[in-house]
């Protein structure tokens, strides 16, 4: 009789020998699953390659559709539903997007076929590389990857508003050295539709709702966040100040101060955040940590003021928060406009 996982865990903790053997079996199963996934993905890539080459060699109209349809029927008879027309087109797309077999082998070692199947249909190469590297770094499940793509994470991340060369360099840094930058961490806007707060609320209500839904908040922000404190009291010149939320970011290896603001961004918020960061740097930093960074969360941004106040090297970011998820088309238009304005501004600065 097969026992469920909870019983096995309980028994293994009671019996040291059993615990060791259970761990060995689990590790072996994981290795086998990874090996099977890798071999299947390589098989699918080779199938796609053969079909693509066959289609290229034949100039007849509609030859490709006929080949795929006939192959699907015959392969499904022999091997089952895994060879539907849709899946065969997936194999062809995989080979089209990843033409280098060595790159494929590297991807297979870190991502499942289901991950790759989602990634290959992202047409923009930089965007696809962003999701690929972030998926590997943060170890997203397939479901999380789909959610990140659907929520337009790339467009909401600061890196999307940078020049193409900067994007490539930061993604290569993440890929080759596992080093993440603030541009890959900060998101704007931040979607807090899970808070369930009403139209009228205070900063305290917002803060309480975030803490009550802390796990969802961290999932939205990114997996490297660790909660440190709320309303952290600091004393400067015998005057009390309170930091709304204090986190630690493992990837950036620094403390992160989050200041929650109702309404539109104001220039005075920058001075307040700078005060907090300087105090943290002098009084709360530990050996080996990097300088703290700040995030000012507002319900509305003042982009012109922000452009005047902050430069590319600033340790402070400003982001809008949305308590309701807007229509995807409206959000897409808004984000695309923000990206174009930021990139045009960068080009004008270079000139």
Image: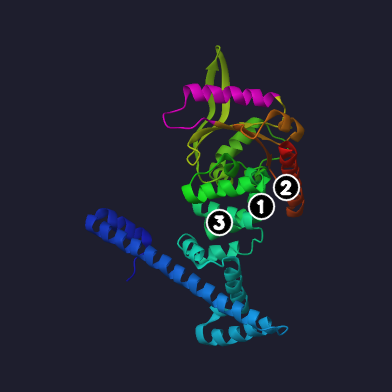
Is 275 magenta? The answer is yes
In this rendered view, identify the residue nearer to me: 28 or 133: 133
Q: Residue at x 76, y 54 (%)?
A: 329
37 vs 76, left or right, is left
- 1 or 3: tag closer to the N-terminus: 3
Helix, strand or loop at disc 1?
loop
Image quadrant where one finds the C terminus? top right
User: Image point 66% across, 44% down: which residue?
Assistant: 162
Q: Nearer the viewer, residue 51 or 189?
A: 51
Q: Which mark is residue 335?
A: 2
Note whether 190 is above or below 260 in the view shown.
below
Front residue (pair 80, 318): 318
Which residue, given by chain and number where applicable, does mark 1 sit on?
Answer: 152
Range of residues picked out in magenta: 268-292
Q: Main secondary structure of the magenta part?
A: helix
For disc 3, the neighbor class at 10 Å (few under 14, some 14 to 19, many from 20) is many
Q: Nearer the viewer, mark 3 or mark 2?
A: 3
Mark with earlier residue (3, 2): 3
Q: Is residue 298 above or below residue 93?
A: above
Indicate which disc residue 132 carries: 3
What residue sits 34% from the left and 61% below the top?
27
Report whether 24 appears left or right of 278: left
Secondary structure under the numbered disc 2 in the rendered image? helix
Kindly report the distance in space between the C-alpha atoms of the residues bearing marks 1 and 3. 14 Å
Where residue 6 sits: x, y (%)?
36, 58
Residue that sits furthest to the top in the current view: 238
The kind of secondary structure element at disc 3 is helix
From this view, report whether residue 29 is shown above or below residue 186.
below
Residue 337 on image: x %, y %: 76, 46
Tag 2 or tag 1, which sits nearer the N-term? 1
Measured as percent of width and height from the top left, residue 283 is found at: 47, 22
């Amino acid at each position: 009789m097969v026992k469920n996982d909870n019983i096995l865990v309980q028994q293994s903790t009671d019996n040291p020998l059993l615990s060791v053997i259970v761990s060995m079996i689990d590790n072996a199963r994981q290795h086998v699953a990874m090996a099977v996934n890798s071999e299947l993905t390589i098989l699918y890539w080779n199938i796609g390659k053969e079909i693509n080459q066959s289609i290229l060699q034949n100039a007849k109209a509609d030859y490709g559709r006929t080949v795929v349809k006939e192959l699907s029927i015959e392969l499904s008879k022999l091997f089952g539903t895994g060879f539907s027309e849709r899946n065969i087109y997936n194999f062809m797309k995989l080979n089209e997007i990843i033409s280098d077999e060595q790159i494929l082998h590297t991807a297979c070692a870190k991502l499942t076929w289901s991950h790759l199947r989602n990634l290959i249909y992202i047409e923009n190469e930089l965007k696809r590389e962003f999701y690929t590297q972030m998926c590997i770094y943060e170890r997203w499940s397939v479901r999380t990857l789909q959610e990140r793509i659907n929520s337009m994470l790339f467009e909401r991340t600061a890196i999307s508003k940078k020049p193409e060369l900067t994007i490539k360099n930061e993604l290569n840094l993440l890929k080759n050295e596992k080093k993440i930058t603030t541009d890959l961490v900060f998101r704007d806007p931040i979607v807090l539709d899970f808070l369930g707060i009403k139209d009228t609320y205070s900063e305290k209500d917002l803060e309480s709702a975030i803490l009550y839904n802390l796990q969802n908040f961290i999932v939205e922000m990114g997996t490297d966040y660790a909660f440190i404190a709320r309303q952290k009291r600091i004393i400067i010149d015998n005057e009390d100040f309170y930091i709304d939320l204090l986190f630690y970011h493992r990837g950036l290896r620094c403390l992160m101060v989050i200041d929650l603001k109702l309404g539109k961004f104001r220039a005075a918020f920058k001075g307040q955040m700078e005060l907090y960061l300087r105090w943290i740097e002098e009084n709360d930093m530990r050996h080996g940590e990097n300088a703290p960074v700040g995030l000012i969360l507002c319900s509305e941004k003042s982009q012109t003021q922000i452009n005047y106040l902050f430069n590319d090297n600033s340790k402070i970011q400003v982001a809008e928060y949305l308590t309701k998820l807007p229509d995807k088309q409206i959000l897409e238009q808004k984000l695309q406009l923000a990206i174009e304005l930021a990139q045009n501004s960068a080009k004008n600065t270079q000139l």
